Image (spheres, rainbow, N blue to C red):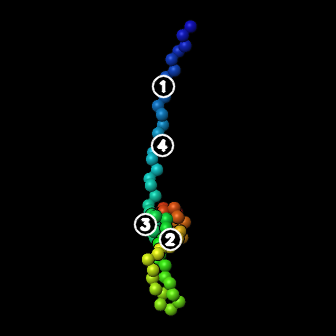
């Protein structure tokens, strides 16, 4: 005994989510880079750099909601 063929149903696709805009403070990197300064009075700049987390987006690189 053959079974009746089921009709096929179409798959529902969800629209793609738009990508959030990059953070305006860190330009989407999630970090800030600052030059290390040495010395109490003159504050001589060195070739070294220090990175810190962006406080606006908390390191995600995306515009905060």
Which badge, 1 or 4, comes first in the chain's sequence? 1
Q: Mark 4: which secondary structure?
A: loop
Q: Which residue is mark 1?
A: 8
In percent of width and height, residue 56 lies at 52, 69
Q: Between marks 3 and 2, how big is the CA–CA gap? A: 14 Å
In percent of width and height, residue 61 lies at 48, 63
Which badge, 1 or 2, comes first in the chain's sequence? 1
Q: Mark 3: which secondary structure?
A: loop
Q: Between marks 1 and 2, how big is the CA–CA gap? A: 56 Å
Q: Nearer the viewer, mark 1 or mark 3?
A: 3
Local crowd at mark 2 within 10 Å, few (<14), some, or many (≥20)? few
In percent of width and height, residue 52 lies at 52, 71
Against 44, residue 55 (above or below) is above
Q: Between marks 1 and 4, how big is the CA–CA gap? A: 19 Å
Q: Which residue is mark 2?
A: 51
Which badge, 3 or 2, comes first in the chain's sequence? 3
Q: Between marks 1 and 3, how big is the CA–CA gap? A: 48 Å
**13 and 42: which one is in front?**
42
Q: Between marks 4 and 3, how big is the CA–CA gap? A: 29 Å
In percent of width and height, residue 34 lies at 47, 75
**46 and 31: which one is in front?**
46
Residue that protrudes farthest toward the right in the picture: 1
Q: Nearer the viewer, mark 1 or mark 2?
A: 2
The residue depicted at 47 percent of the width and 74 percent of the height is 49
Q: Which residue is mark 4?
A: 14
**21 and 15: which one is in front?**
21
Local crowd at mark 1 within 10 Å, few (<14), some, or many (≥20)? few
Q: Which residue is mark 3?
A: 27
The residue depicted at 55 percent of the width and 13 percent of the height is 3
């Amino acid at each position: 005994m053959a079974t009746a063929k089921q009709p096929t149903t179409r798959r529902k696709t969800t629209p793609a989510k738009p990508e959030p805009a990059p953070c305006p403070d860190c330009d989407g990197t999630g970090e800030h880079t600052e030059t290390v300064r040495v010395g109490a009075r003159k504050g001589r700049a060195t070739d070294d750099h220090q990175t810190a987390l962006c406080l606006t987006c908390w390191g995600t690189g995306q515009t905060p909601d």
